[in-house]
């Protein structure tokens, strides 16, 4: 007789709402998930992950900074804010052809999503925006999912990007509403939510997450997840970034966030937003292959590949290839529905 109980009756894995899509999570429920025993949390997240995704598939995205540095904002983590003295190579908007050449390279390396970032507070209706529109058209024509992160966006600008073929837009909440003004004072949480709403209204896939390791509390992390998971529709992509502490920024002295916190954050995001692609984003360069594996086990199914994120280093392409081989992971195809047909 087998007396082993695979799931303890009072464990979170047997919770009635495991794997259901909900937009009415309470802070208390999220807290309970976030603080549950780590292995139980990972198990539950892995279970939810398997209900909605092929666990062997990981989306490979490539980032390119199309306009670097000189940003008027005061985001305390960001090496591109003009007011901090960081050692980055600034440049104005790249040429369309340069960007398309990089996108073709990324595509040849197996990347299916190409994300272009600009150090802007917001999009302005000028010639630079016209150029970005051409970039979007060009990348889209390569058959890649094209994504942009350009700062705040109006409804009209979102519509223009959509018409050009934009697939996704990244705009992070970064942290909780309560901690937000410790990190950024030059725009509000409400501004961020409005941009996300404009993106959603234009029928563009929403990519929104945040950063941990900026001195926030666990409650702040729970608060950010609460806001994301209770949006009228969950973001299709949720990047979880570990702060990359860059010399010259106000957060330069922050200690590296423990991997356990990344795992908790990823697992909780996976349980709250089962259909989303949860992206193990910035910070991979200081994580061992084993630590990254724990993140995949906890439900991460997307990474940025390539030697650089926007301005900071990322793991070697060869090291990533090796890890994919060891774990038997395969790159996810472009434009695959987020619900994996279920
Ligand atoms: N300027 C645009 C904006 O703020 O939306 C787009 C680019 S911005 C660099 C994109 C995101 O990168 C930020 O919202 C933040 O979450 C992330 N990021 C920036 N610097 C980071 C750092 N040092 N460590 C981790 N994530 C960072
Ligand atoms: C996201 O959440 N992380 C990426 C992407 N969205 C744009 C950016 C990470 C930037 C890390 C710091 C840098 O390289 O400048
Ligand atoms: Fe500017 Fe974006 Fe960096 Fe903030 S995160 S300083 S808006 S580039």
Image (cartoon, rainbow, N blue to C red):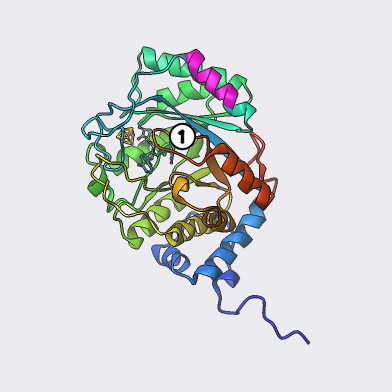
Q: Quadrant of ligand 2?
A: top left
For the record, the magenta segment spans 96-105
Q: Is residue 237 magenta?
A: no
Which residue is found at the position 48% from the left and 54% from the top? 23
Tag 1 secondary structure: loop
Which residue is found at the position 47% from the left and 47% from the top? 284
Foreground of the two, 7 or 306:
306
Q: Where does the image place residue 137, in percent across and percent down from the top left?
A: 54, 18
Q: Is mark 1 within 8 Å of ligand 2?
A: yes
Secondary structure predominantly adopted by residues drawn in magenta: helix
Query: Can residue 106 be spotted in the picture?
Result: yes
Quadrant where the N terminus is found in the figure: bottom right
Q: Is residue 3 left or right of residue 40?
A: right
Which residue is found at the position 45% from the left and 36% from the top? 309
Foreground of the two, 259 or 121:
259
Which residue reaches farthest right? 1
Query: Can residue 231 be spotted in the picture?
Result: no
Foreground of the two, 207 or 155:
207
Q: Quadrant of residue 93?
A: top left
Q: Where does the image place residue 77, in percent across and percent down from the top left?
A: 30, 43
The residue identified by callout 1 is 308
Q: In the figure, 150 relative to 240: above or below?
A: above
Q: In the figure, 311 relative to 293: above or below?
A: above
Q: Quadrant of residue 75?
A: top left
Q: Where does the image place residue 193, in percent across and percent down from the top left?
A: 37, 41
Q: In the figure, 218 relative to 165: above or below?
A: below
Q: Is residue 98 magenta?
A: yes
Q: Where does the image place residue 36, in percent across and percent down from the top left?
A: 47, 70
């Amino acid at each position: 007789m087998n007396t082993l109980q695979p799931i303890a009756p009072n464990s979170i894995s047997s919770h009635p709402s495991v794997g259901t899509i909900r937009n009415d999570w309470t802070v208390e429920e999220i807290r309970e998930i976030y603080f549950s025993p780590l292995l139980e949390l990972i198990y539950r997240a892995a279970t939810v992950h398997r209900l909605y995704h092929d666990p062997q598939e990981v989306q490979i995205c490539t980032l390119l900074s199309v306009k670097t540095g000189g940003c008027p904002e005061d985001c305390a983590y960001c090496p591109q804010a003009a007011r901090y003295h960081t050692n980055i190579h600034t440049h104005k908007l790249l040429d369309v052809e340069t960007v398309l050449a990089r996108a073709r390279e990324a595509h040849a390396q197996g990347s299916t999503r190409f994300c272009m970032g600009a150090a802007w507070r917001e999009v302005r209706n000028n010639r630079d925006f016209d150029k970005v529109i051409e970039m979007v058209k060009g990348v889209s024509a390569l058959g890649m999912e094209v994504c942009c992160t350009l700062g705040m966006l109006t409804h009209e600008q979102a519509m223009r990007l959509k018409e050009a073929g934009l697939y996704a837009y990244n705009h992070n909440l970064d942290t909780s509403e309560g901690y937000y003004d410790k990190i950024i004072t030059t725009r509000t949480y409400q501004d961020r939510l409005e941009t996300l709403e404009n993106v959603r209204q234009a029928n563009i896939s929403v990519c929104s997450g945040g950063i941990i390791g900026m001195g926030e509390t666990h409650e702040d992390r729970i608060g950010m997840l609460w806001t994301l998971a209770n949006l009228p529709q969950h973001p299709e992509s949720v990047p979880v970034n570990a702060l990359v502490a860059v010399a010259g920024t106000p957060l330069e002295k922050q200690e590296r966030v423990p991997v356990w916190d990344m795992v908790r954050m990823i697992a909780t995001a996976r349980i709250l937003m089962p259909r989303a692609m949860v992206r193990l984003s910035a910070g991979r360069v200081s994580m061992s292959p084993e630590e990254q594996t724990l993140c995949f086990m906890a439900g991460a199914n997307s990474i940025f590949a390539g030697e650089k994120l926007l301005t900071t280093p990322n793991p070697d392409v060869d090291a990533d290839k090796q890890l994919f081989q060891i774990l038997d992971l395969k790159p996810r195809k472009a434009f695959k529905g987020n619900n994996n047909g279920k």
